[in-house]
Amino acid sequence: MSIELDQYFKARRELIEKSLDQFLPSEQTYPEKIHQAIRYSLFGGGKRIRPILLLAGYEIFRDDLERAMPFACALEMIHNYSLIHDDLPAMDDDDFRRGKPTCHKMFGEATAILAGDALLTEAFGLMARAGLEMGSDQVGLKAIQELGQAAGLSGIITGQELDLEKQGQVYNEQDLEYISRHKTAALIRASVKVGGILGGAGESELTALSEFGERIGRAFQIVDDVLDFQVGDRDRKGSESDARKKKATYPALLGLSQSRELAKRLSREALKCLEIFSDRAEPLRKIAGWLVAREY
Amino acid sequence: MSIELDQYFKARRELIEKSLDQFLPSEQTYPEKIHQAIRYSLFGGGKRIRPILLLAGYEIFRDDLERAMPFACALEMIHNYSLIHDDLPAMDDDDFRRGKPTCHKMFGEATAILAGDALLTEAFGLMARAGLEMGSDQVGLKAIQELGQAAGLSGIITGQELDLEKQGQVYNEQDLEYISRHKTAALIRASVKVGGILGGAGESELTALSEFGERIGRAFQIVDDVLDFQVGDRDRKGSESDARKKKATYPALLGLSQSRELAKRLSREALKCLEIFSDRAEPLRKIAGWLVAREY
């Protein structure tokens, strides 16, 4: 990563984490355990890629980032809810995430389920409050609708369901595409698109952002799979790797080289979608480049 | 229950179930299992008390029930999500609900967690779509904010967390009040209040509806506890009773007679809150009367 991009990420992460802290009750709030579990998971060192993408989409149109911040934070809360639930014993059964014990390992399964439920619910409440403060409510409602779709039955839920159903089973490229589109790309696409919605993008601009987001979302998942595949039995986060769990992944089906090619093609297509924008889309372009060029 | 009220409930239930059916993808939608799990739980014979309360609050002000229907259905979806998650082995570990195997018993834990997550997420998406269709007032966002609060850390989540923490532990009346206010009364209060918000109620009317809802919500929980306590080891739904699970309940702490008195007092106070309304609040008054007079 270039020093410039590294500093951009760091500054944005700090902004986002400061806001997340303000939008949620403190650890001292009664009953303390649920609030500790939420903060343990939310402040466990995530890269904040999704809210950074939202803000990068937003700054094509406007400079007042704090206006978009509640939505960026809601997005990160939704992402973290999905991680907590995915890690549960009944789901992917992961003991570690980002090198630390997972939420249910630290606080028990019941509190982990509730912490996920809380993050999902509070995310929508936060967006509704922010929408009301904006005055013109169409923008807030459109953002909620978009994230509701990406996190619901047209996105994360059915992606995770099929991912679990295909574990240890025979699968084909169509299954992989379904899983990556729903489980990963839907929320990444929504991140960029909601940035545009909040920024006041027109129809054709929204389409461009949405198609860009879909492609980098899919590329992101493939690169993640490739990185995990190279590491072997334990993945980069200290958990049992997808290969060991016999999960459906691109490298396992197509091999490393063809998977890398596919990620590069999607990334090139993504960058093409941004051609209609000025230099103000430069951060978005750089993030897209980095997502695919990570560590290999 | 009077024949009149019985018919009112039946007609409303049919309306609500028809709309729920329309608002959700069919069981044939790919991947089928998650959609089957959602519909198995959602159409498992619930009383639909919360959406009926929302509509009864709404009809104080307006007659066009179909305008409020997406919000009534979203409320029922949120209620059913909380039942599916509460029944999980890590939570209340219930094998039966409404006399039938619980969602995780039928579809496995992973799909049950995802079915709950989906219902919660889709509820917010549904309200956002309905809010956008309403046009430009802020009513949709206010409803989302209200239900987000009731279902989140100021409501269901912290209520269920404390309920689990107090299981088998020493507890006092303050704990019970906290649990019943958060776990049950918050969503019932929001039901009535959102009916008012959608109907265009003024500030003092919203306060009256909110205070009414809080009280019947608490009374409802106490009556439920009393009914379960009388039945013994298995509760009315075929599951292990709260008493056997050593859950914090009013009858276990105060005895049956004092618990009944408390429910009656809350119900009287609730009805007083409705005095500012005309005959149009008659359904709400009758429902409140029935909630407390159930089967004893």
Image (cartoon, coloured by chain):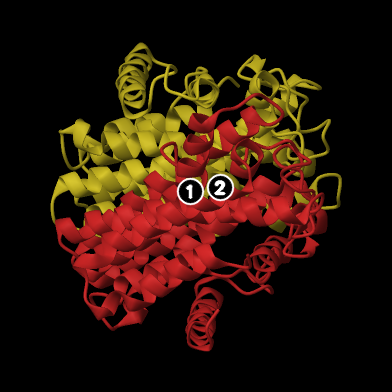
Chain colours: A red, B yellow
Picture residue at 23% right of the left edge, 48% below the top:
B131
Q: How many marks?
A: 2
Mark 1 and mark 2 residues within 8 Å of each other at the beta carbon: yes
Secondary structure at badge 2 equals helix
Q: Position of residue B46 (x, y in %)?
A: 50, 22
Residue ID for mark 2: A259
- Using residue B203 as the reference point, say whether residue B267 is left or right of it: right
**From the image, which quarter does the N terminus of chain B lie in?**
top left
Q: To which chain does the residue with label 2 belong?
A: A
Picture residue at 39% right of the left edge, 60% below the top:
A191
Picture residue at 23% right of the left edge, 61% below the top:
A139
Marks 1/2: CA–CA distance:
5 Å
Q: Position of residue A249 (x, y in %)?
A: 62, 41
- Using residue A162 as the reference point, say whether residue A57 is left or right of it: left
Please say if A112 is above or below A57. above
The numbered dot on residue A262 is 1
User: From where the camera sits, is residue B264 visible?
Assistant: no
Q: To which chain does the residue with label 1 belong?
A: A
**In the image as oriented, which residue stretches furthest toward the front?**
A257
